[in-house]
Amino acid sequence: MKRKLIAAVALLSALALASAAADKKEPLRVVPSIDFDRYAGKWYEIARLPNRFQKRCAGEVTADYARRPDGKITVLNRCRLADGGAIQAEGLAKNVGKGQPNSVLKVRFAPAFLSFIPQVWGDYQVLALAPDYAWAVVGDPARKYLWILSRTPALDDGSYGRAVAEAAAQGFETARLEKTRQMQAEPRP
C-alpha cells in the first residue's frame, strides 16, 4: 500500500509539471475519431520516450484496453523487469468530452479514491492510427510522454518510420525514443 501511495504521489507530481509545460505548447493534432471496439485489445509497446514510471521495465511492455459498460476504458499495463519478474498497473481511461474528439482521453492509474483530484488524470492523446488499427502513436500535449504501439511485438520499418515522422512533426524529441525489447513476434489473432 505504501508503494502504491508513493507511486501515486510521484505520478501526481509528474502530471502537474507536464500540465504546466503543456500550456506553452501548440495543441496536438489528434486522430479525429476512434472506433473503441477496434482499438480495444492488446497493444505492444514498440518505442517510448524515457519516463520515470517505466524506468524499471526491461521489456515485454504491453497495454490491454477493454471497453466498459459505462463507456470508460479499463487499461492494464504490464512489463517484464530485469530480474525476470513482472509488474502491472491497472488504470481507467475516460473521454475528455466538451467538444473534444474521442481520441483525447484522460487516464488514471492512481487509486480510485483520488479520482476527484484533477492531477491524477494524465493526458492520453492518439496522434496517429493506422487505418487497419495495426499501430498507433500516443502522446501528451507537453510532448514529455510518447509511445509507439503495435498490435504485434514487431513493427515493420515503414510503419515505424511513419509513426516516428508523425511524432517528430508534432514537436516530440524522437531522437530520444527508446525501442522496447519484445519477445519474438507472436501470431496475430
Image (cartoon, helix red, strand yellow):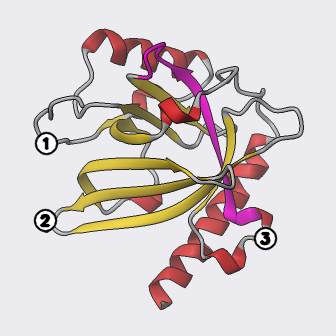
Residue 93 image point, x, y percent? 62, 52
Contact between labelled residues 3 and 2, with CB atoms less than 8 Å apart: no
* Relative vertical location of residue 67 with respect to residue 101 in this rendering, above or below: below
* Relative vertical location of residue 168 with respect to residue 138 in this rendering, above or below: above
Give the mark nearest the N terminus, 2 or 3: 2
Residue 186 falls left or right of residue 140: left
Check the image and name the residue furthest to the bottom.
Answer: 2
Q: At label 2, which amino acid type do we have?
A: Gly
Give the mark nearest the N terminus, 3 or 1: 3
Q: Which mark is residue 84?
A: 2
* Relative vertical location of residue 155 with respect to residue 94 in this rendering, above or below: above
Say which residue label 3 marks.
117
Compute the Cα span from label 3 to label 1: 37 Å
Check the image and name the residue furthest to the front.
Answer: 69
Q: Which residues are magenta?
A: 119-133
The answer to which quarter of the image holds residue 85 is bottom left
Where disc 3 sits, the SS reads loop
Residue at 43%, 12% (x, y): give it.
162
Residue 82 falls left or right of residue 46: left
Mark 3 burial class by Cα count in 10 Å: few <14, some 14-19, many 20+: few
Say which residue label 1 marks.
183
Residue 135 image point, x, y percent? 40, 24
The answer to which quarter of the image holds residue 160 is top left
Q: At label 3, which amino acid type do we have?
A: Ile
Residue 179 image point, x, y percent? 29, 35
Contact between labelled residues 1 and 3, with CB atoms less than 8 Å apart: no
Residue at 23%, 34% (x, y): give it.
153
49 falls in the magenta region: no
